[in-house]
Image (tube, rainbow, N blue to C red):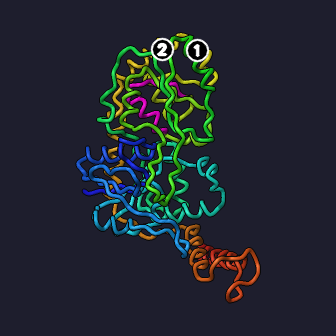
Amino acid sequence: MKICIITLEQTNRNYSLSGGALRVTGLKYLLQSMGHEVVVLQKEGPQDLNEDTYSFQMTEAKSDGLLHTDISDKILEISPDQVIVEQWGLLEWFETEVPVIVDLHGSLIWENYYKGYRDEQQTRAKLICLAKADAVIVPGERQYYYFLAWSQMAGLKELDQRLRIVPLLLDESFYEHKVNKESSTIVMGGATWPWVKQLPEEKLQRYLEKENLTVLSKFYQPQDTSIHHNDDGAIVKTGEAHNTLIKQYCQSLAAFDLYEINMERKLAVTTRSVEYLYCGLPIIYSKGLELSDIVENNGLGILIDQPSELFKLTKLKSKLQECKRNVFQFNLKHYFFDKAQESLDCILNLTKKKNTLSPITNIEIERRLYRKRVGELESSGPKQGGLSEDSFYKDLWLKDMETIYKRNLK
């Protein structure tokens, strides 16, 4: 089967990779190991393309208020049997006759809040996009239940078949540099999102020095992944090249992956945490998160309730050395592969679903059609033909109530 993965991320390891890009490369690796042909279609950018990778264009909004893209043309050129979309927002910008799967691996509650997406239109737009998907995959159990609600609101039926957990697997060839040798370095990295509260780095360094350890900070300022492409040709450096960064990780003792708990982290299967384990690094990690049970049951790191509790630990180096031996004995691929393959086999065998829009998405579609017909609405007062926004929603509500009433009489 030929499968096309569509993403806004760039996937060339000569540059930094986001968590979303790692998910894409992981899905590609998993699907190829199952015998499928995989092509990645990513947003056009200044970075070089990998082999078996295409790019699509997405322009700034034109006078009609719409973005323009050639994704549909690219899909026709690639001619896949299935499409996997890595960001739900892309679902609105193409049409295809083959089944479309959307991969959802983050709630983005706080990310969207800090980016300014705080109005109800974001919710409506998300429902419209998800209504176009034939199936949904997620990497973790918590996200399964979170997106179960979204899938139901979007009108997705047969949820036991069309909503599945596909655990996060990464390409093992990326991490061949890992070594099980003496080291005193603890690494910490990832994006410095505004909602992430970390321990003061200087205080952390002083504590680790007392424990005969050093810290290697690889944090970076994230680049905003916008839906359109900035054509100035500049390559924005958001961190070290992935292939260089991983070599440094693989030479270290452990990874510090500990932040104050927040809603985003509670719902996430943090890709960086899994990647640390692939590098052979035990992790210092928070209790009560998606990966906590795996870490605790297999001795893959140290779990702490609050970040400040770290400073109360003694003999940290010897504890991490013991955990590192456990990490090398733990087979991540074996742990996740069977479930991931089973879920994908089920999803890839699905046919395109029937049009099963929910009442919520139907209302939003009608609202959009109305706006397109009469132009921008005012908050009150007559519009073209004596229509107003208030009367439009009132009419929609009355029509929905009438439909529900008639349905209940049957």
Please check the rendered image and state whether residue 275 is part of the magenta-colored stretch, yes or no.
yes
- Examine the rendered structure and indicate whether residue 200 appears above or below residue 313: below
Observer-nearest of 10 and 128:
10
Residue numbers of the magenta segment: 270-285
Point out the residue furthest to the right here. Answer: 381
Kind of residue at badge 2: Lys
Observer-nearest of 340 and 325:
325
**Res 197 quadrant in image:** top right
Observer-nearest of 349 and 378:
378
Q: Are marks 1 and 2 in contact (CB under 8 Å)?
A: yes
Kind of residue at badge 1: Leu
In space, the residues marked 1 and 2 are separated at their CA atoms by: 10 Å
Residue ID for mark 2: 319
Residue at 54 percent of width and 60 percent of height: 126
Residue ID for mark 1: 313
Whichever of callouts 1 and 2 sits on the residue coming sooner in the sequence is 1
